[in-house]
Image (tube, rainbow, N blue to C red):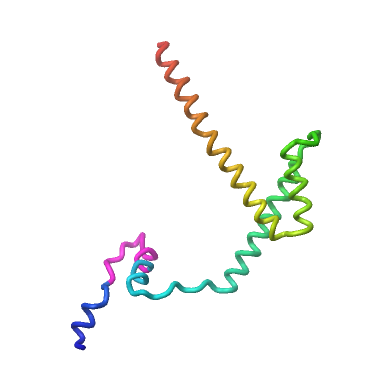
Amino acid sequence: MSDESAATSRPQPASVKPAQPLRTLGDLRRQLGTPAPRELASARRFRAVWADLQANERVGEALARRPRNAGPLNSHALVLQLVSSLQATSPAYLRRVVDLVETMGWLERASERPTTAARKKATSAAARRRR
Protein backbone atom coordinates (compact mmCIF):
# COMPACT_ATOMS: atom_id res chain seq x y z
CA MET A 1 0.00 0.00 0.00
CA SER A 2 1.48 3.35 -0.97
CA ASP A 3 1.61 6.38 1.26
CA GLU A 4 -0.84 8.23 -0.97
CA SER A 5 -3.56 5.55 -0.69
CA ALA A 6 -3.07 5.31 3.09
CA ALA A 7 -3.39 9.06 3.40
CA THR A 8 -6.59 9.16 1.34
CA SER A 9 -8.28 6.29 3.23
CA ARG A 10 -7.99 8.02 6.63
CA PRO A 11 -10.40 10.83 7.41
CA GLN A 12 -8.65 14.15 7.40
CA PRO A 13 -9.24 16.53 10.31
CA ALA A 14 -11.37 19.52 9.40
CA SER A 15 -10.13 23.01 10.02
CA VAL A 16 -10.58 23.66 13.73
CA LYS A 17 -12.46 26.74 14.85
CA PRO A 18 -11.15 28.13 18.16
CA ALA A 19 -14.54 27.74 19.89
CA GLN A 20 -15.02 24.06 19.05
CA PRO A 21 -11.76 22.12 19.51
CA LEU A 22 -13.26 19.46 21.79
CA ARG A 23 -16.23 18.85 19.51
CA THR A 24 -13.90 18.46 16.53
CA LEU A 25 -11.66 16.14 18.53
CA GLY A 26 -14.66 14.01 19.52
CA ASP A 27 -15.91 13.87 15.92
CA LEU A 28 -12.47 12.81 14.73
CA ARG A 29 -12.28 10.12 17.43
CA ARG A 30 -15.67 8.72 16.31
CA GLN A 31 -14.64 8.77 12.64
CA LEU A 32 -11.48 6.83 13.42
CA GLY A 33 -13.43 4.36 15.54
CA THR A 34 -11.30 4.73 18.65
CA PRO A 35 -13.01 4.01 21.97
CA ALA A 36 -13.85 6.82 24.36
CA PRO A 37 -11.24 7.41 27.06
CA ARG A 38 -12.15 6.09 30.50
CA GLU A 39 -12.62 8.49 33.35
CA LEU A 40 -9.87 8.52 35.93
CA ALA A 41 -10.71 6.82 39.22
CA SER A 42 -9.50 9.86 41.14
CA ALA A 43 -11.87 12.11 39.14
CA ARG A 44 -14.75 9.73 39.89
CA ARG A 45 -13.93 9.78 43.63
CA PHE A 46 -13.60 13.57 43.61
CA ARG A 47 -16.99 13.93 41.91
CA ALA A 48 -18.62 11.63 44.48
CA VAL A 49 -17.06 13.45 47.45
CA TRP A 50 -17.99 16.83 45.98
CA ALA A 51 -21.60 15.70 45.44
CA ASP A 52 -21.77 14.50 49.07
CA LEU A 53 -20.40 17.81 50.35
CA GLN A 54 -22.86 19.79 48.25
CA ALA A 55 -25.79 17.63 49.39
CA ASN A 56 -24.80 18.06 53.05
CA GLU A 57 -24.47 21.82 52.57
CA ARG A 58 -27.91 22.04 50.94
CA VAL A 59 -29.42 19.94 53.72
CA GLY A 60 -27.88 22.18 56.36
CA GLU A 61 -29.26 25.28 54.64
CA ALA A 62 -32.72 23.72 54.35
CA LEU A 63 -32.74 22.65 58.00
CA ALA A 64 -31.81 26.19 59.01
CA ARG A 65 -34.88 27.50 57.15
CA ARG A 66 -37.26 25.06 58.86
CA PRO A 67 -40.69 26.64 59.55
CA ARG A 68 -41.31 27.16 63.26
CA ASN A 69 -45.04 26.48 63.50
CA ALA A 70 -45.48 23.96 60.71
CA GLY A 71 -48.36 21.55 61.10
CA PRO A 72 -47.95 17.75 61.08
CA LEU A 73 -48.81 17.50 57.36
CA ASN A 74 -46.77 20.49 56.17
CA SER A 75 -44.90 19.21 53.10
CA HIS A 76 -41.81 21.32 53.80
CA ALA A 77 -41.56 20.01 57.36
CA LEU A 78 -42.10 16.41 56.21
CA VAL A 79 -39.35 16.65 53.59
CA LEU A 80 -36.97 18.16 56.14
CA GLN A 81 -37.75 15.34 58.58
CA LEU A 82 -37.05 12.77 55.85
CA VAL A 83 -33.82 14.50 54.86
CA SER A 84 -32.52 14.76 58.43
CA SER A 85 -33.14 11.06 59.09
CA LEU A 86 -31.53 10.10 55.75
CA GLN A 87 -28.49 12.21 56.53
CA ALA A 88 -27.78 9.99 59.52
CA THR A 89 -28.60 6.63 57.93
CA SER A 90 -27.66 6.72 54.24
CA PRO A 91 -25.66 9.60 52.73
CA ALA A 92 -25.69 8.05 49.23
CA TYR A 93 -29.47 7.77 49.23
CA LEU A 94 -29.69 11.28 50.68
CA ARG A 95 -27.77 12.63 47.68
CA ARG A 96 -30.31 11.04 45.34
CA VAL A 97 -33.27 12.36 47.33
CA VAL A 98 -31.80 15.88 47.42
CA ASP A 99 -31.30 15.77 43.64
CA LEU A 100 -34.90 14.56 43.21
CA VAL A 101 -36.34 17.28 45.46
CA GLU A 102 -34.28 19.97 43.71
CA THR A 103 -35.47 18.70 40.32
CA MET A 104 -39.09 18.79 41.45
CA GLY A 105 -38.61 22.34 42.74
CA TRP A 106 -37.03 23.40 39.47
CA LEU A 107 -39.91 21.86 37.49
CA GLU A 108 -42.41 23.67 39.69
CA ARG A 109 -40.67 27.00 39.16
CA ALA A 110 -40.36 26.35 35.43
CA SER A 111 -44.08 25.62 35.13
CA GLU A 112 -44.94 28.86 36.97
CA ARG A 113 -42.89 31.11 34.70
CA PRO A 114 -45.12 30.98 31.61
CA THR A 115 -48.19 31.66 33.73
CA THR A 116 -46.58 34.73 35.30
CA ALA A 117 -45.32 35.93 31.92
CA ALA A 118 -48.75 35.39 30.39
CA ARG A 119 -50.36 37.44 33.18
CA LYS A 120 -47.91 40.28 32.68
CA LYS A 121 -48.50 40.20 28.93
CA ALA A 122 -52.28 40.24 29.39
CA THR A 123 -52.02 43.09 31.91
CA SER A 124 -49.84 45.17 29.60
CA ALA A 125 -52.16 44.45 26.64
CA ALA A 126 -55.18 45.53 28.69
CA ALA A 127 -53.38 48.72 29.74
CA ARG A 128 -52.59 49.51 26.10
CA ARG A 129 -56.23 49.02 25.11
CA ARG A 130 -57.36 51.49 27.78
CA ARG A 131 -55.14 54.24 26.34
- Image coordinates of residue 46 in percent, x first then y, are 62, 67
Residue 17 falls in image quadrant: bottom left
Which residue ends up furthest to the top in the rendered image? 130
- Is 107 situated left or right of 31 in this image? right
Residue 6 higher or lower than 92, as above or below: below
The question of residue 82 being in magenta is answered with no
Magenta residues?
Answer: 13-25
Q: Is residue 21 left or right of residue 44?
A: left
Q: Residue furthest front?
A: 73
**Considering only vertical position in the picture, is 14 above or below 112?**
below
Q: Measured along the vertical axis of the image, is residue 126 above or below residue 75?
A: above
Residue beneath the point at 63% across and 59% down? 51
Where does the C terminus fall, quadrant-wise? top left
Q: Which of 121 and 85 is in front in this view?
A: 85
111 above or below 129? below
Left/right placement of residue 75 relative to residue 102 reads right
**Quadrant of residue 43 within the rendered picture:** bottom right
Residue 15 covered by magenta stretch = yes
In the rendered image, the quadrant that contains the N terminus is: bottom left
* Location of residue 79 in the rendering, given as x and y in whole percent from the top left corner: 73, 44
Residue 32: image location, x then y, percent: 33, 74
Picture coordinates of residue 129, whole percent (x, y): 40, 13
Residue at image position (47%, 27%) is: 118
Q: Nearer the viewer, residue 75 or 131?
A: 75
Left or right, 15 with respect to 118, comes to: left
Q: Residue shown at 19%/82% (left/top)?
A: 5
The number of numbered discs placed on residues in the rendered structure image is 0
Point out the residue furthest to the bottom here. Answer: 1
Q: Is the magenta stretch mostly helix, strand or loop?
A: loop
